[in-house]
């Protein structure tokens, strides 16, 4: 497993390359001010869901939010 510094650096680089510096800063700022528990969110949306149902939801999301 890689250490936290490497993961953080790669994460920032991903944000910068995809969003640019201004939007990356906006994203980080929003993460810091909005209370968000990823584990709780993940459990609310995905615990007990079958692989087939997950795949259908992912395919639908992909259609509604095309990668540009």
Image (cartoon, grey):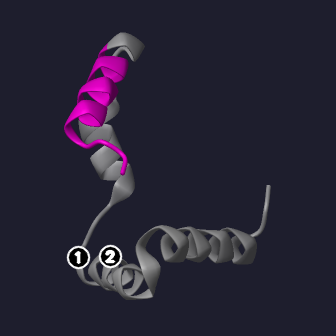
| Residue 13 visible in rendering | yes
Q: State left or right for residue 35 relative to residue 3.
A: left
The kind of secondary structure element at disc 1 is loop
**Which residue is pictured at 66% across the width and 70% down the height?**
10
**Cα separation between marks 1 and 2:** 6 Å
| Disc 2: CA contacts within 10 A as few (<14), some (14-19) or many (>=20) | few
Q: Position of residue 66 (x, y in %)?
A: 30, 42
Residue under label 1, please give it.
34
The dot on residue 48 is none
Q: Quadrant of residue 11?
A: bottom right
59 vs 21: above or below: above
**Which residue is pictured at 63% across the width and 74% down the height?**
8
| Disc 1: CA contacts within 10 A as few (<14), some (14-19) or many (>=20) | few
What is the chief secondary structure element of the magenta stretch?
helix
Q: State left or right for residue 54 relative to residue 3.
A: left
7 vs 26: above or below: above
Whether pointer 1 and pointer 2 mark residues with C-beta atoms closer than 8 Å, the reply is: yes
Q: Position of residue 50 (x, y in %)?
A: 36, 14
| Residue 48 visible in rendering | no
62 vs 31: above or below: above
Residue under label 2, please give it.
31
Tally of numbered discs = 2
The kind of secondary structure element at disc 2 is helix
Residue furthest front as drawn: 68
> Could you tell me which quadrant the N terminus lies in?
bottom right
**Which residue is pictured at 60% across the width and 74% down the height?**
13
Q: Is residue 42 magenta?
A: no
Q: Position of residue 46 (x, y in %)?
A: 32, 32
Q: Which residues are magenta?
A: 53-68
Q: Quadrant of residue 47?
A: top left
Q: State left or right for residue 17 relative to residue 35.
A: right
Q: Position of residue 49 (x, y in %)?
A: 31, 20
């Amino acid at each position: 497993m890689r250490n936290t510094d490497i993961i953080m650096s790669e994460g920032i680089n991903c944000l910068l390359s995809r969003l640019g510096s201004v939007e990356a800063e906006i994203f980080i700022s929003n993460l810091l001010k909005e209370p968000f528990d990823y584990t709780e969110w993940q459990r609310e949306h995905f615990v007990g869901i079958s692989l087939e149902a997950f795949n259908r939801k992912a395919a639908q999301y992909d259609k509604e939010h095309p990668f540009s």
